[in-house]
Amino acid sequence: MDVFLQLTFSGVSNGMVYALVATGFVIIYKASDVINFAQGEFLLFGAYLAFAFIAQFGLPWSIGVLLTMATALVLGLVVERLVLRPLIGEPIISMIMVTIGLQSVLKAVVHGVWGAQPKAFPNFIPSGQFVLGGVVLGADRLLSIFIAGALLVLLTLFFRYTRDGIAMRAIADDQQAALSMGISIKRVLAVAWAMAAGTAAVGGIMVANLVGVSHDISGVGLRVFPVVILGGLDSISGAIIGGAIIGLLESYTGGYIGHGLNLIVPFIVLVLVLMVRPYGLFGKVIIERV
Amino acid sequence: MESGVFFSDYRRDMALRRLPLEKMRMAIFVVAVLVFPFVASNYWLNLANQIAIATVGALGLNILVGYTGQISMGQGAFMAVGAYTSGILTARFDIPFYLSIIVASLMSAAVGLLFGLPSLRLKGLYLAIATLAAQQVVEWVVTHWTALTGGTEALVLPAPELFGIRLNRDFSFYWFGVVIAALTALFVANLFRSRVGRAFVAIRDQDIAASAIGVNVFKYKLVSFATSSFFVGLSGALIAHYRTIVTWERFTIETSILYLAMIIIGGLGTISGSFFGAAFMVLLPAMINTLGRSLQGTAPELVALLPSIQQAVFGIVIILFLVLEPEGLAKLWRNIKDYFKVWPFSY
């Protein structure tokens, strides 16, 4: 029973990190129907930026995190302006490939600037432990659940009540109708990319805190695909629940079966979901016969 | 010259090379390919072999992505199936390699058929993600089914031998690789003059319209997956025998991305584009390497950065092509030809 609870805890906390990364996907997909393959590299960039500001420049962590967020927002804006905007309306394969190109460039920049050696992440997140009913709860993991939860609430509120959030939903629903109502697609896309990069930076800091600052962080970008597909590509709450389910699934298969199966089970789930219910648990149902 | 040419019968209108100038260009290309190995150094022969093998793989992927419009991120997985099947057959069962590559290609086609099944319900983005999952699953099987593949250990193959000639040198392999690449190109060129190939194109352009005019969309999508995977598996098997060593690192998601980049930079849905893209993607890192090495004296710190520079250039090239010339090198080549069509009397 203890093992089960322990696995549940680590599964949920991993799942929340996934959920946070997945929201980055969802925001971009909602605004522009683009899947961002460079999301993992945004994480990587965020983690290394935080490392640079806090460990290399010796700034206090609060300022370091703020600067990381600010830089990530700017990065998102620049990427949208230079790479994505010229491709509005191009076929899907162009969109996929352009984000893959972006991924390659970002990875190369991080590699070139900081080298290939993994780094220790500055420990500003408290590392104490609580024991609750036989389960060891790491403070950093609890905090990551809390941060992810808070950000997700903020994002939900953003989509429900702010002008930009509603505009984003309108564009996702019908681009032409939104345009004719005077919504600026350019502005909305810029906001979406900035937000995705921002959430990815936070996610990057959290992942780096759990596993250290290394190039493996970008792998999370790939591992989040099952989450977004399961939850639905255009649903924030889907990202949270999908994240929790995939996190738990990985944790249980890793704990009870092993053999590295935890790396592959989410992808098998992904294929099954795609076959049965391609729009995911909470995605908007679009029936298109092929 | 090329302008003002009219045909009075279908046979000539349907020919692969219709114009005298086209025939001349083809002849020059063939002569160049034949002369090349006698004048080139081993370094260049090695690059040429890589290009020949990559061309086969790129043609295979182009059948699926460029002509049928089904995005696949499982190229690496299909190549792995081809490479490992052929490798295991020759290394463990002593089957001659010219038979094993055929078995490997068929095996890869079968696996392609299996992973093509989601395409019956999915398209576009969702299909891309499904094939990404297939890539992950195959990668996992290859690295974990140790009894069959040797897991993360390298699988070492005997040197390939054909008609008593050992193809273990770049010079001898060149002829084999080039012939296979040429046959593949010929097959693909003819495929798209047939009913099957035209059905692929119809599905790409408008799948609903295609089914309305009597194309069995399900069937032809699967046929496309199988044909494409056949050649992709073939190129995987060729790599295995060319290197005489198979390691799983060669067939990761990065490989899938590399090949997608090839056909996009070369030109989606063109045969010459597959060749241009393969050549470009093989030569680009090699050229950057040479350039970096030659600058070693003046800027030694540059050499340490070479891998990063290669990766950055790779990404930038993809982005630039997509933004500036989405139809790729094949289109650029066509522009050049069009320019000279009426030269010097262009208007």
Image (cartoon, grey):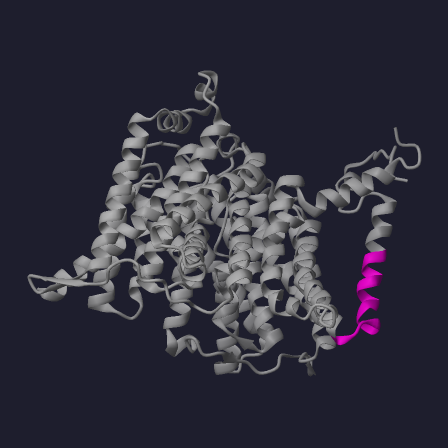
Left or right position of B7 against A197: right
Query: Looking at this view, is A149 or B151 the one in front?
Result: A149
- Residue B41 is covered by the magenta coloring: yes
Quarter of the C terminus of chain A within the rendering: top left
Query: Looking at this view, is B319 or A174 the one in front?
Result: B319
Query: Residue A1, image x and y in percent?
Result: 8, 64
Query: Residue B285, image x and y in percent?
Result: 66, 63
Q: Looking at the image, which residue is at 71% across and 63% down? A: B287
Q: Splitting the image into 4 quarters, where does residue A155 fall?
A: top left
Q: Is residue B128 visible?
A: yes
Q: Looking at the image, which residue is at 43% across and 21% down? A: A178
Q: Magenta segment, principal secondary structure?
A: helix
Query: Residue B188, image x and y in percent?
Result: 65, 52
Query: Looking at this view, is A255 or A193 the one in front?
Result: A193
Query: Residue A126, image x and y in percent?
Result: 24, 59
Q: Is residue B216 above or below residue B271?
A: above
Left or right position of A131 against B316: left
Q: Splitting the image into 4 quarters, where does residue B27 fall?
A: bottom right
Q: Which residues are magenta?
A: B28-42
Q: Looking at the image, which residue is at 32% across and 47% down? A: A20
Q: Is residue A272 visible?
A: no
